[in-house]
């Protein structure tokens, strides 16, 4: 049966296509073009904005997809998430200027739902301001007392005299599957999930061995 897969633009798209191809799907990284979807054998690839992947999978337009845990958690959609694929690792953290000690009255973030949940769990009533890019600048200009943003290496924070105060969420690329598709296309999806689980375990073992 045909499969439709939703992947976000950028690095996850490239790594995801490569991993899915290793798992046996007849796909390859498409040549750069203005196309938004590609049909390769029985598989259709959709290239979406990060935030749209959970929507397409949850509503059944896509049978499965790959998306960062941060985006999935922010979406609030209860999608079947069978596997942590182990790449594109980063963390969502509360960030302030080094040495800042004043009260936190306003927090800026691309992740307002996760930020509000985190603040509520800490008993803080700060205003949450949603921004779209260069979140750290909100701290540096005084727009916000703190920000919640993704951190990978921490280089940007160090270059701008910022520091992580607390890690809110560990994120990595996740396989997500539409629950109805899992039943109707189980002969295609179950073996794919199994093969991806094997590949992910193999990669984790290789990384562990190389770090010894």
Image: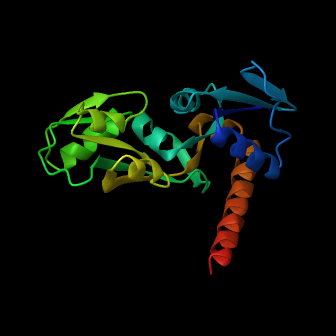
Residue 42 visible somewhere in the drawing: yes
Q: Position of residue 52 (x, y in %)?
A: 54, 27
**Residue shown at 23%/33% (left/top)?**
142
Q: Where in the figure is residue 95, as x and y percent of width and height? A: 31, 48
Whether residue 76 is visible to the viewer of this picture, yes or no, is no
22 left or right, relative to 91: right
Colour pattern of the rendering: rainbow
Q: Which of these two is toward me, 143 or 126?
A: 143
* Quarter occupied by residue 183: top right
Q: On the rendered structure, is 89 left or right of 37?
A: left
Quadrant in the picture for the C terminus: bottom right
Q: Residue furthest top?
A: 34
Front residue of this view, candidates 20 and 91: 91
Picture quadrant of residue 10: top right
83 left or right, relative to 42: left
Give the image location of residue 189, x and y in percent: 71, 44
Q: How many marks?
A: 0
Q: Is residue 191 above or below residue 8?
A: below
Q: Quadrant location of the N terminus?
A: top right
As drawn, 199 above or below 54? below
User: Which residue occupies the foreground of this view, 209 or 3?
Assistant: 209
User: Most extreme residue toward the bottom, as rendered?
Assistant: 212
Residue at x 81%, y 32% (from the top left corner): 30
Quadrant in which residue 179 is drawn: top right
* Residue appearing at x 74%, y 30% in the figure: 45
Please tell me which residue lies in front, 154 or 50. Answer: 154
Left-right relation of 209 to 91 = right
The residue located at (20%, 49%) in the rendering is: 121
């Amino acid at each position: 049966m045909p499969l439709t897969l939703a992947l976000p633009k950028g690095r996850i798209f490239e790594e995801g296509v490569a991993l899915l191809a290793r798992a046996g799907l007849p796909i390859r990284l498409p040549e750069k073009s203005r196309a938004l979807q590609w049909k390769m054998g029985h598989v259709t690839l959709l290239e979406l904005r990060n935030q749209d992947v959970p929507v397409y999978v949850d509503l059944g337009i896509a049978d499965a997809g790959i998306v960062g845990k941060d985006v999935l958690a922010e979406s609030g959609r209860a999608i079947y998430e069978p596997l942590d694929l182990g790449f594109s690792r980063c963390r969502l953290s509360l960030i302030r200027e080094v040495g800042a000690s004043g009260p936190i009255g306003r927090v800026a973030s691309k992740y307002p739902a996760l930020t509000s949940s985190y603040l509520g769990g800490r008993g803080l009533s700060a205003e949450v301001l949603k921004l779209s890019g260069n979140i750290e600048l909100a701290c540096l200009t005084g727009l916000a007392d703190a920000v919640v943003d993704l951190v990978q290496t921490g280089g940007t924070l160090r270059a701008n005299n910022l520091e992580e105060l607390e890690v809110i969420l560990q994120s990595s690329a996740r396989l997500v599957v539409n629950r109805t598709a899992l039943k109707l296309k189980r002969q295609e999806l179950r073996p794919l999930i199994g093969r991806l689980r094997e590949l992910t375990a193999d990669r984790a073992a290789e990384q562990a061995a190389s770090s010894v």
